Image (cartoon, rainbow, N blue to C red):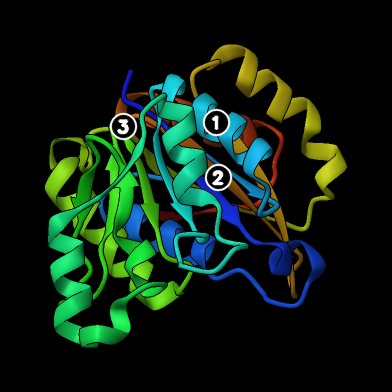
Amino acid sequence: MNPRVGLILIGDELLSGKRRDQHLVNAAHLTAERGLAVDWARIEHDDYEILTRVFREAMNSGDIVFSYGGIGATPDDVTRPAAAAAAGVPLVRHPQIVALLENHFGERAWPNRIRMAEVPEGAALVPNPPGLIPGFSLGNVHFLPGFPDMSARMVAWALDERYRDLHHARSVEQLIDVFETPESELVPLMEKLLSEHPDVRLSSLPGGGKPWRIEIGLKGNSAVVGAATAWFVEALKRSSIAWRLGARL
């Protein structure tokens, strides 16, 4: 089994609605381009105890996890110490980040900005081109800044440099448009499909319009999706339900 991909979105401003999240959209696009997918996401407060527990769970999950936010230098940024606590290691100042901060800010790097050089002992760096403050990784958990454009570049780097062998190795999705049929009437076919093909993941998304359309998505490895698609199409034909094969993603 290939590892799942998960996201941890950190920030009270996300939970309060002051800011709309863009990380999930970016990550969904970046993973899809590489034949992967986002499997789960959670939003958490800037809380040291909560984040320590969440990071520990992520580190023990075996998943590929991207954590966004909370790695700045202000008192509300607690991702760094929480990550260190979760890993059971101290925070240390990384000489490469110290040099970046001093080169960019000079004496103004001290005494506060230099806190951004603190990473859990043993962490690897996630580059933040061009010459900006990097994120860091502990195993398969990657800690990134909360700026969407910046973090998207870093996710792309991690996917390409750390997980290239997983590209296009995990899942595909076949879309099937079903016309002029209420979603409720498709439920028995959906249940039968999942009974016959338990390894496929099914989604149903009403699309509206004229004629009325429902978009069925079948996701899994190529062989599983191919067999499930053939079964579902034959079932639609037998039920005299209009359909059209959509894109394969």
Left or right: residue 14 compared with residue 162: right
6 shown above or below 206: above
The residue at the point 44 percent across, 49 percent down is 80
Q: Position of residue 192 (x, y in %)?
A: 68, 19
Front-most of 124 and 217? 124
Front-most of 201 and 67? 67
User: In terms of image quadrants, where is residue 84?
Assistant: top left
* Spatial CA span between label 1 and label 3: 12 Å
User: In terms of image quadrants, where is residue 140?
Assistant: top left
197 shown above or below 86: above
The residue at the point 25 percent across, 40 percent down is 123
* Spatial CA span between label 2 and label 1: 8 Å
Secondary structure found at label 2: strand
Q: Mark 1: few, some, or many residues within 10 Å (few <14, many ≥20)?
A: some
Q: Position of residue 245 (x, y in %)?
A: 47, 52
Whichever of labels 2 and 1 marks the residue nearer the N terminus, that label is: 1
Specify the label residue 217 is tagged with: 2
Specify the label residue 222 is tagged with: 3
Left or right: residue 110 compared with residue 190: left
Specify the label residue 201 is tagged with: 1
> Do the residues under discs 2 and 1 have CB atoms within 8 angstroms?
yes
* Spatial CA span between label 3 and label 2: 13 Å
Residue kind at label 2, given as amino acid type: Gly
